[in-house]
Image (cartoon, helix red, strand yellow):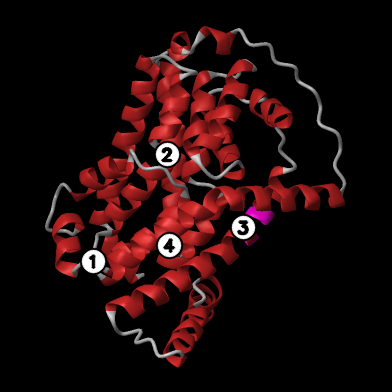
Amino acid sequence: MKTVWLFFQNQVLGMKWLNNIIGIGLSAVGMDTSSRFGGSVQFFAYDVIKITILLCFLIFFISYIQSFFPPERSKKILGRFDGIWANIIGALLGTVTPFCSCSSIPLFIGFTSAGLPIGVTFSFLISSPMVDLGSLILLMSIFGAKVAITYVVVGLIIAVIGGTIIEKLKMERYVEEFILNASSVDIESPTLTKKDRVIYAKEQMASTFKKVFPYILIGVGIGAIIHNWIPQNVIESVLGSGNPFGVILATLVGVPMYADIFGTIPIAEALLYKGAQLGTILSFMMAVTTLSLPSLIMLRKAVKPKLLGLFIAICTIGIILVGYLFNIFQFIFISL
């Protein structure tokens, strides 16, 4: 069973066969893939093609699922629960919504305007970019099932705890008035046929791909530079076990960046190969996807500074704690 799973992880999700084919092709045209430049070209071509294939498949699949959860239906589902169960459902719904933090802000505003508890909407807002279903598959292709599943579970826990804290502190008064007073017309979405859902999934796949592909190119480009041009001892000294502040540094560096899980994967892959600690890498990924500067600017239009600051503090502290937890138990996640 373990052999079958390793084959699935390496050859199906990881597409190692594709890397071999690209290497053979580059060698055939006279490029030395063992050189820095040749290795960078191979890394870039392999990761762009691999991530594009996984991206299109995942967006189509997740969008098909998402077609069963339009905003109106999601509001009704969330409205049936209260307490921590509502936060859990809100966090879980976040896994079948758009792929970056900026895409989640409009839905967050809509849910808040509809009168849903503020803690529930923030649980949704935290989980949506951090732990979508796509991240599970992509993380499995790089780090394996154990790390990927743990990442998703921990991300959901951060979302639930964060939303619960905001709810308990009664932070509704720090939501901008125009959001609270916005009228919400809850129109039942028409029943979609199977063909309609397939068309919707195709449209979402094309639209999302156009938005995220430039960030994939940037992310893979950075990954190729890290992978082939930055000495391993430099990465290890900054983000390895020798630097106790590596997790904090990676989190702070990730916050002002803007990308989604697809853009951060190649960077994470290169960092891991160069000796960066697992928890440090995951903290960087979480910070980039959850606390990107553009999304915080958008969120500021909907909430007042005190609530925005609390949201940032909860996410930052949670991400840093998760990073150190993964670093402490890294040998468990990798060896088993």
Earlier in the chain: of badge 2 and badge 3, it is 3
Residues 182 and 46: in front is 46
Residue denoted by label 4: 146
Q: From the viewer's perspective, is the residue at label 4 or at label 3 nearer?
A: 3
Which region is colored magenta?
Answer: 57-61
Residue 161, image x and y in percent?
Answer: 41, 31
Q: Amino acid at mark 3?
A: Leu
Residues 151 and 57: in front is 57
Earlier in the chain: of badge 4 and badge 2, it is 4
Q: Secondary structure at mark 4?
A: helix
Residue 132, image x and y in percent?
Answer: 54, 47
Q: Which mark is residue 145?
A: none
Circles 4, 2 touching at the beta carbon (< 8 Å): no
Earlier in the chain: of badge 3 and badge 1, it is 3
Q: Amino acid at mark 1?
A: Gly
The vertical placement of 21 against 322, above or below, is below
| Residue 70, picture quadrant | top right
- Our reading of the magenta stretch's main secondary structure is helix
Identify the residue at image location x=63%, y=11%. Answer: 182
Q: Secondary structure at mark 3?
A: helix
Q: What is the CA distance from the residue labelled 4 to the residue labelled 2?
A: 22 Å
Residue denoted by label 2: 290
Q: What is the CA distance from the residue labelled 2 to the residue labelled 3?
A: 20 Å
Residue denoted by label 1: 275
Q: From the viewer's perspective, is the residue at label 4 or at label 1 nearer?
A: 1
Residue denoted by label 3: 58
Q: From the viewer's perspective, is the residue at label 4 or at label 2 nearer?
A: 2
In the rendered image, which quarter contains the C terminus? bottom left
Circles 4, 3 touching at the beta carbon (< 8 Å): no
Q: Would you call the spot at circle 3 few (<14 residues within 10 Å), some (14-19), or many (20 or more)?
A: some
